[in-house]
Amino acid sequence: MKIDVNKQSSIRISGSKILYFDPLEWNYKHDADYIFITHSHFDHFSLLSILELKKDSTVIVTPKDIVEELLSIGIGEEYILVVSPNQKIVLKNLEIRTIPAYNLHKKHHPKDKGWVGYLVDFDGVTYYIAGDSDVTSSAKEVKCDVAFLPVGGTYTMDCLEAASLCNLIHPKLAIPIHYGYVVGSIKDAEIFKKRLDKDIECKIFMKGEQQD
């Protein structure tokens, strides 16, 4: 199993299949078995990146509000799996649960949009990709081996909130995301790491500072 994060919340997990979450500016070409989209904001949903990564059999898992755009670039309905919060879906090689992803007291990610994070059981490991979310009651109930949590603040939980959530759900491995591009910097990832319980491993993939 190999994990990588290259920008913002753009995650690649490779094992018996290759999974991408909110892909953005990868160098890989046409190797995706599954592409997961959490929501429609530009730093999470890139048609160009999807076209660069998809192959004929790629399945795209997504909330309903970007389906029309996917159809407009020639992706067939049979390769689009539309999801909403609080679903459980069993596919070949993986099991998916959709976790509501929204802001509690901010307007950027309203709950009624139906946007999601993903809890994915894949090759014997459970991954939680939180999406753009605050620390919700649903997030607090997650059980996983690996947690990808936003730490940049402003539009999502900040690094301290993310660390508190991580200590509560207590994965084996924590990976900070959503910093260094729109808001936040490597400092947020480092603070997140320092605030974790000692028995939670933390890996920081993105080293760059915030870009203008």
Image: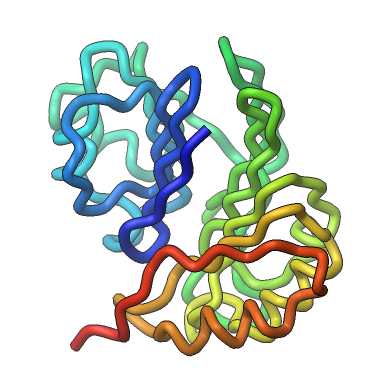
**Applied colour scheme:** rainbow
32 vs 174, nearest the viewer? 174
Q: Residue at x 30, y 85 (%)?
A: 210
Please say whether residue 169 is visible from this viewpoint: yes
Q: Residue at x 27, y 35 (%)?
A: 68
Q: Is residue 102 left or right of residue 54?
A: right
Q: Is 26 rendered above or below residue 101?
A: above
Q: Residue 65: name its quadrant.
A: top left
Please say whether residue 110 is visible from this viewpoint: no
Q: Residue at x 47, y 38 (%)?
A: 2
Q: Residue 185: name its quadrant.
A: bottom left
* Residue 174 position within the rendered picture, expressed as x and y whole percent measured from the top left: 65, 61
Q: Residue at x 42, y 85 (%)?
A: 184
* Residue 29 position within the rendered picture, expressed as x and y whole percent measured from the top left: 16, 32
* Residue 128 position within the rendered picture, expressed as x and y whole percent measured from the top left: 64, 48
53 vs 40, nearest the viewer? 53
Q: Is residue 159 left or right of residue 154?
A: right
77 vs 133, nearest the viewer? 133
Q: Is 169 rendered above or below residue 184?
A: above
Work out which quarter of the rendered image holds the C terminus and state it: bottom left
Count of marks placed on residues: 0
Q: Residue 121: name its quadrant.
A: top right
Q: Is 61 rendered above or below residue 46?
A: above
* Residue 140 position within the rendered picture, expressed as x and y whole percent measured from the top left: 82, 61
